[in-house]
Image: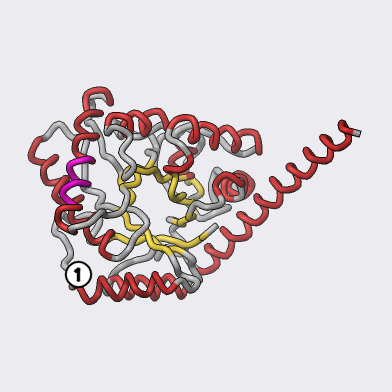
Amino acid sequence: MDIGAHVRSSGGLPAALARGREIRADVIQVFTQSPRMWRAARHDAETLARVRAEIAVGNRLRRVFCHATYLVNLATPDAALLERSRTCLVDNLTTAAAIGADGLVLHVGSHLGGGFAGCRDQVAKSLLAVLEETEEVLGRPGCPILLENAAGAGGTVGRSFTELAELIDAAAGDARLGVCLDTQHLFASGVAYDTPEKADQVVADIEHHVGLERLACLHVNDSAVPLGANRDRHANLGEGEIGEMALSLLLGHPSLETCAAILEVPGNGDGPRDLDVALARRLQQAGASHFAKRSARGMGRSAGTAR
């Protein structure tokens, strides 16, 4: 499993790569523009090509994901805001594709009380329109849009695997749509995974509703709020309500080993540190070891039965 973190992109995208290398990340996530401003950042072609080339080299830092601007809301009933969101998302997706990103993570938005059923088709139509416009701008296919599960606050869309599946189905199952699983959002929405059986159930639910082939990355965060609190509040690994054991069981689950794991933890207030990335690696290894031992025990029982 590639493990890394969201890093600041202040100073430009090459500076973000340098920060990723400093914390010994295999993978980084960046914003392509300010996450709380509509104005698109203008990256020159030389910079984009440089970033793409550095990632393609495939040393320790070998994958990059981008995160869409927080202001984007594809579920809004406001026509002007919807159009602005689409335009912003095209800008984000175009930059992500230009640097060779594996995907653009998206908070779908909020229906603002109108209900999921009322916004589902609008969201799906918007996603397809953004994907098509981006391909027209680039003159080639872009990268996937990865729908992130929500913590469940207010009218947020995507608070369950069922909702994410409905959005993808409404978009005719387009292969350019994937999923990002946030561990804190999952916990805050009321889903526990503190035993191997519960972790198995999470994986089974993903497979049943959206398909594991669509799961591209994990946002790995502990939670500053209790199970089912429906609030998006991240904590450093092992310092929140989820705890190291539960996180290790998802990180180390054999069905998720090809996913990228991206920390979005506060660190000391300036984002993930090298020690946070190192801890995530230890948790992943502990979880993988647990499942390997469980598998070995199961094989041993089968052999005993056969004899």
Classify 164 as above or below 15. Answer: above
Q: Position of residue 35 (x, y in %)?
A: 25, 56
Q: Residue at x 70, y 52 (%)?
A: 289
Instruction: Determine the residue located farthest toward the left in the rendered image.
Output: 80
**Residue at which label 1 appears:** 43
Q: Residue at x 50, y 38 (%)?
A: 226
Q: Position of residue 142 (x, y in %)?
A: 26, 54
Secondary structure under the numbered disc 1 in the rendered image = loop
Instruction: Determine the residue located farthest toward the right in the rendered image.
Output: 307
Magenta stretch encompasses residue 132? yes
Q: Residue at x 15, y 49 (%)?
A: 133
Looking at this view, is 273 or 3 the one in front? 3
Looking at this view, is 184 or 134 the one in front? 134
Magenta stretch encompasses residue 208? no
Secondary structure that dominates the magenta span: helix
Magenta span covers which residues?
A: 128-134
